Image (tube, rainbow, N blue to C red):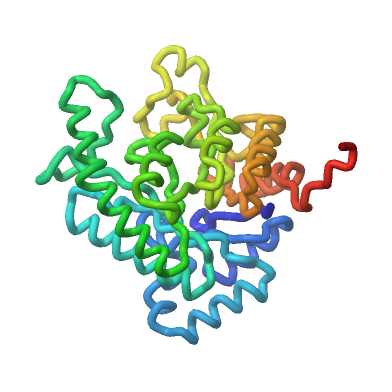
Amino acid sequence: MKIGLFTPVLASLGVKDMIAKVKSFGRVEAIELGTGCWPGSSHIDLDLLLTDPAAAREYRQMITDSGLVISALSCHGNPLHPDEDRAKADDEVFRKTIRLCERLDVPVVVNFSGCPGDGDGASHPNWVTTAWPPEFHDILEWQWTQKAIPYWSDAARFAANHNVSVALEPHPGFLVYNVETALKLRAACGPSIGVNFDPSHFFWQGVDISTAIRALGSAIFHVHAKDVAIDEYNVRMNGVIDAKSYRRMPDRSWLFRTVGWGHDELEWKKIVSALRLIGYDYVMSIEHEDALASVDEGLHQAVNFLSRLVLTQPPAEPWWT
């Protein structure tokens, strides 16, 4: 297993300076690059590399010469957005990213499942969290049967035709937000659809991370390393569903934290072990969204923490049996 880094956190740096910065952390062997939508595209020119094969070869060689690999290209967006122009734009970036993955020999594209509105003519996404009153159940059924399954079935075929796997990141606010919804979409749309597993989005929902990993199994295509700290006082008062601004840190029920600052080493050892048990031997890509730590300090802390935990060699044969 390799330690990786999701690079939008270094968006202020040009690509060569970003690579140098990543290398300065020591144990990082992989980078995950944003190609547009919410992550932006600070370190890669999607259109240039698609239209200019020589530029793509030069770009890939630059990454190889640095001793790094690209673990995934990521374009977290909402291709199911009820605003047709927004949905079309996010879908276009997504399909271009798939084509660039094929050109750069990157096996995985990361995205969100997206969320439609409550029907034709809606202007904003509508994330349903309860089955009652009955109209909520009707909305959810329409979102899945009329929007999500048709779109992702077609997207899965497109990705498979380009030899790319689609890792959807379960995230509250979108149709795929937990194990059940991820496996539901995969069952409907095929094995090209899987998961970018980010423990932080499961922690605050009360999910046991190792159990979720075992349940998803081979559907996990890529992994983020990001933690969450639960504020027990605020949870006891308001529960875990919290729509307050992330800037109101003392008032929130939970905060994104650098790995090790929300859950201890034993918990993350369980995560690494659960990933190994399902046969995952790819990348744990650090995503830094910790507002209590600087970028440099947060990334150094994350790399140092994971360096003690990530198992890099093949497991031993059970010689004692």
Q: Is residue 274 above or below residue 103?
A: above
Q: Is residue 235 above or below residue 198?
A: above
Q: Is residue 47 left or right of residue 259?
A: left
Q: Is residue 210 left or right of residue 152?
A: right
Q: Residue at x 32, y 54 (%)?
A: 153
Q: Is residue 225 above or below residue 236?
A: below
Q: Nearer the viewer, residue 47 or 191?
A: 191
Q: Residue furthest left?
A: 121
Q: Nearer the viewer, residue 316 or 86?
A: 316
Q: Residue furthest top?
A: 237
The quadrant where residue 185 appears: top left
> Residue 299, percent across and down?
63, 49
> Residue 312, percent across and down?
75, 52
Is there any visible trace of residue 187 in the rendered image?
yes
Q: Residue at x 33, y 37 (%)?
A: 173
Q: Nearer the viewer, residue 191 or 25?
A: 191
Is there any visible trace of residue 246 in the rendered image?
no
Q: Residue furthest right?
A: 320
Q: Residue at x 20, y 28 (%)?
A: 136
Q: Residue furthest front?
A: 321
Q: Residue at x 42, y 13 (%)?
A: 237
> Residue 254, percent across and down?
48, 28
